[in-house]
Image (cartoon, grey):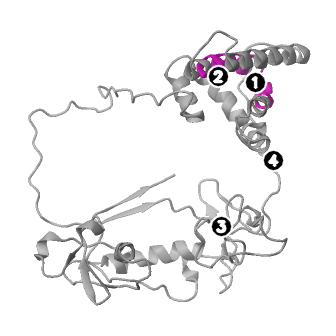
Amino acid sequence: MEAVTHGKTYKYDAGGDVSRAKTLGMPEQQHSPVLKICVAVALLSSSLPCYVKAQHDSIPGVPSYVVSAGFPTSVFSSYFSPPVPTQEPQPIIYDPVSNSTFPLNLTDPNTIPTSDNDPIYFPPAIANVSNATAEAFVSAAISQIREIISGAGGISGNCSKCVAALNIGKLVAQITPQYVPNALVALCQSTGFASNSSCTNSYSAGTSGAVWTQVMVLADVSGLDGRYICNSLSSTFCTAPSTSPLNTTNLFPKSKPKDTTAPSPSGERVKVLHLSDFHLDPRYSAGSEANCTTGLCCRTNVKNANLKSGQISLSASLYGGYKCDVPYDLGVAALQAIAPLTGTDGNSSLAWSIYTGD
């Protein structure tokens, strides 16, 4: 792959490492193609325009792809809101497993819920205590944890303190699980672990408080689990534990073959497609705030707190924004680009594909 700027042509290897850039004239076999050549050239000069020139023997497909104007309506069989040039479509999605069609209010960008009505689940309590007893028990537990943190409990070292506090938290979670979220918020705020609003957002029952309750009930807080939990809260509490060795004895139906050797490489190139973190957002709204200060941007319910109400600092494009998840137009365009960019058609298919991400 070559990039031309300032009248000079640069060639890059597969790693895209600018430090290994060489001017033309070096042996052809020392270099491999890269796709993000303009990024590499930009590192050489922050303000230089560049263009990509593909060599026919180095790239399987076309060097660039421009999506056709207009959303391809054939992608979905029917729509609540058909595609228009100014907003992404709202397709009708049918689920064959449940034999039902998802209603529009699940994806409509104008009907984003303002409250979370999902049920909250707590692990069952191991004891039946009255409210008064539960409140007294939780209050005593919070006081004991504060003593541990302050060092008055005779325990030294942040990791030991954190694990000791988790042991008390586990007992509270087992006996009075529904009281744990409020206790976590109170401890977070009183110790200054985070701001008051962050403590509420992180540990209230409707966010992650109920999840933390389940974690404490199920975890071995005195052992490896406890150290992992404390490290996840802060690396100043416990250092990250070493990875435990994995026992693979019963993971495979047959034993590992003996005296095996890797086959010699055939030298044949294959095409492999790697897709990662697609993150489609059916509630994406073109024209909304793409540079919001809270939450996921490019939605109708977010804003930039530095501006007056109704003002927008960066209008969300039909094809996405940096702080936003993927709109339909961008997702479909990316899929459309695969075949021409990889030179893949009916006579030249991909060897395999890998889909990764959360």
Question: Magenta stretch containing residue 174, yes or no?
Answer: yes
Cα distance, mark 2 to mark 1?
A: 9 Å
Q: Is residue 116 left or right of residue 285?
A: right
Q: Earlier in the sequence, mark 2 or mark 1?
A: 1
Q: Position of residue 117 (x, y in %)?
A: 81, 47
Q: Position of residue 40 (x, y in %)?
A: 35, 72
Question: What is the magenta range?
Answer: 162-183
Residue 234 occupies quadrant: top right
For the N terminus, the image quarter is bottom left
- Is 117 above or below relative to 275? above
Let me know if residue 271 appears in the view. no
At label 2, which amino acid type do we have? Val
User: Mark 2 = which residue?
Assistant: 217
Element type where label 1 sits in the image:
helix
Element type where label 3 sits in the image:
loop
Q: What residue sits 69% from the left and 28% below the top?
A: 213
User: Mark 4 = which residue?
Assistant: 117
Element type where label 2 sits in the image:
helix
Element type where label 4 sits in the image:
loop
At label 1, which amino acid type do we have? Pro
Q: Earlier in the sequence, mark 2 or mark 3?
A: 2
Cα distance, mark 3 to mark 1?
A: 36 Å
User: Mark 3 = which residue?
Assistant: 282
Q: Earlier in the sequence, mark 3 or mark 1?
A: 1
